[in-house]
Amino acid sequence: MTKSRRKPAKTLPLLPTRELVVFPRMVAPIFVGREKSIKALERAFADNTPIILSTQREPDIEEPTSDDILRVGTIASVVQLYRLPDGTIKALVEGQKRVRINRFTSTSPHFQVSYTVLEPRDSDAAADRVEALARAVLREFIRYVDTSPHMPDEIGQIVGAVNDPAELADAVAAHLMIPFERKQELLELSDTEACLGAVLQILVEENAVLDIERDINEKVQEKIESTQRQIFLHEKLKVIRDELDDAEAEDESVKEYYRLLEEKQMSPATVEAVKKEISKLKSTSPMSAEVSVIRNYLDNVFALPWGELAEKSDYELAEVARHLDKTHYGLAKVKERVLEFLAVGKLLGRDQPNTTLCFVGPPGVGKSSVAKAIADALERPFVRISLGGVRDEAEIRGHRRTYVGAMPGRIIDAVSKAKVDNAVILLDEIDKMDSDFRGNPAAALMEVLDPVQNHEFRDNYLELDYDLSRILFLTTANYEESIPATLYDRLETIHLSGYTFEEKVQIAKRHLLPKIASETGLKRRDVTITPAALKAVIRFYTRESGVRELERSLRKIYRKVARRYLEGEAELPVKVTASGLEEYLGPAPFSEERLERKPLVGAGLGLAYTSTGGEVLTIETVVAGGKGEQVLTGQLGEVMQESASTAWGYLLSRIERDPAFRRLFGPDSPACDERGQWDMTGKDLRLHIPEGAIPKDGPSAGIALAASMLSALSGRPLKPGVASTGEITLRGKVLRVGGLREKCLAAMRTGVKTIVLPKANRADVQELPPKVRKSLEFVYVENFRQALEHLFT
């Protein structure tokens, strides 16, 4: 018995194409330049056999391998073959049937593959559905040909003559202008119904996109035609005006500009400059881009008041005083200085005397609200200009018109908003300005705030002189030291210090609670906050110099009451007690600050002034084994480190020579040996200020640093309840410090009984509230030696 031999599979040459998918019955020209592809074409043409065309997965691959070629392609016949002068071949191929590549039998000198023909699959049960799909495809394709600008009309007639649904699907797919990946998906569908459905979906999507494109093109064309028509009509109108010399035919906007020019009280030089701009507008083509620039400039010029004043330009000092008392509790010294300032201006006959007021103080103490109250009392418009973070001179003076999008500076913009020339303008946060390569805004403000210069202020955008002398400029800052030196000389500072506990209670009762009640939709009687509850909010839920955090806490209470009332969980009126505060505000973030009652070695109290008010600092110092160095921790700033170094140098120079210092030392002192002699060999002096994540700086802790070091070196405890403030020098002199009010308020809040401070600050103590002076004992010293008996037990 003999075994039957397996018939070898048929093989044909394969030509990989790039971004070209050939469908059955599709005739396509191809240009071939790769060596393998040329040999495959020549072999098929010479043997008069078909060739298989299959697309590469990635068209950028120059020498594809078998893995780079898709497995479904088309068997095609080579109709014509031409060799071009450059060595490439142009061939005309006609697709016949879909094939699936089984395997690659050879890859050299060209690809040779075995294949299986994929015949179209039809279902008799779905014949009606296939016919319906074919009609829909033909209908959508004709619409696609009519809409697409790149499709010849003859294609619709050619495809319309195809009767077989499978052939129709292939013919339509071959002419779709879609990515080759989507065409490959259609080629791989051998089921006629599925292929027709996929082709129909693509046609619907493409027709929708073409409709949108057509609508956009029509709108663009209409706009272009309308623009050309307007240009033609404007040019024609210009010729008619020139011929008739009819003044009444002028543009209405130009007439309006001339009318405003007559109304405004401009100087002759300004009138002449504005007339030139109006004339330029008349002579410029309406469709020129320059027209909008000129119109914008003229609109900005005529938006300025040019001499217009508020209805009530005069004021009575008594009325201003009553209004300030009504809107602000306390601040007696501030109100007094404001009234003196306004009195001088009234006598001089101008709103801005020879200086500008600057309100200096921590956040929330009422700097901006005082400025607003002054404007309300004078019945003048109020405009606030925030200068925090401004570092570009053009923000003040404006941009030159040569720049695209140029605009006036903030000063001219504020005057335009005020609509009068005697408004109140607040320059807020002038200490937060910066400078860089774009200029120094502080230098630009010099002209604004200087009464000698500001009557001819020149904005870079307007390029016209504008009189700012009747505007009342007020400024604010948090730190006096941070105000640019160029401005400080032109300012008169008024310090708004932090409020005492009692002042915060009164401010809350008189101002905050009525304001919050009206802004939350509740009536004053709907919510009753007991005096004990109000004091508890101030003591345990806020820690600030001003009342901003206090206002936020009270608002939170009112909001919770409003919500509970609307949800039916509470009935009005609601009474808020101290014991129920946690229900509204949550756990108290602060506890009652109390100092140590027993004397401690190396633990001294210093007073600091921060942007949020005063703070009591605990300074801890110990003597530990080491290399004989001074180690400072607690994120101390450069100035505070120098202050600690100065205090250490002073102590080293006095400990062994001054009897007042030697009396503090004994045999048990950490800095001495067994005989009681000074010996810091192998020992470090380590100083730390708690809350190390918070930066600390400034020279005013000099006394406290020296006292803490001396206590740790000698082992002698410091008196409890005694705090100190004052800068120390290498000779032990104690220099004046600032922020005394805030420091004393913090000391009183934390239970400090005695404050050691420089003698130069005696006058500042007299300015403190009476209750603060009564609660604290003040010890004035000129040098550190005088402070020893008050600091040590």
Image (tube, helix red, strand yellow):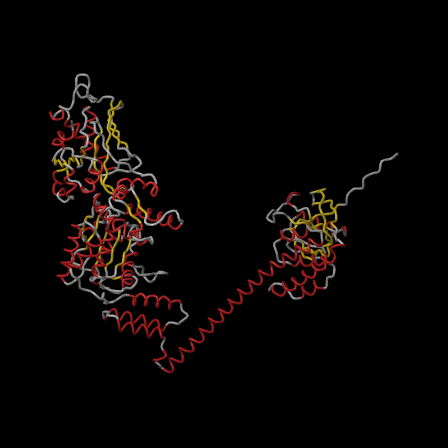
The outermost residue toward the bottom is 244
Asked if one can make out residue 447 in the rendered structure from this viewpoint, the answer is no
Q: Is residue 3 above or below residue 206?
A: above
Q: Identify which residue is drawn at 28% across, 39% down.
A: 540
Q: Quadrant of residue 238?
A: bottom left
Q: Where in the figure is residue 224, as x and y percent of width and height? A: 49, 69
Asked if one can make out residue 68 in the rendered structure from this viewpoint, the answer is yes
Task: Judge left or right: residue 426 versus residue 109.
Answer: left
Query: Residue 425 or 567: which is nearer the viewer?
Result: 567
Q: Quadrant of residue 549?
A: top left
Q: Where in the figure is residue 393, as x and y percent of width and height? A: 29, 55
On-image quarter of the C terminus: top left
The outermost residue toward the top is 674
Q: Where in the figure is residue 232, as x and y percent of width and height? A: 45, 75
Q: Is residue 722 above or below residue 297?
A: above
Q: Identify which residue is drawn at 23% across, 65% down.
A: 310
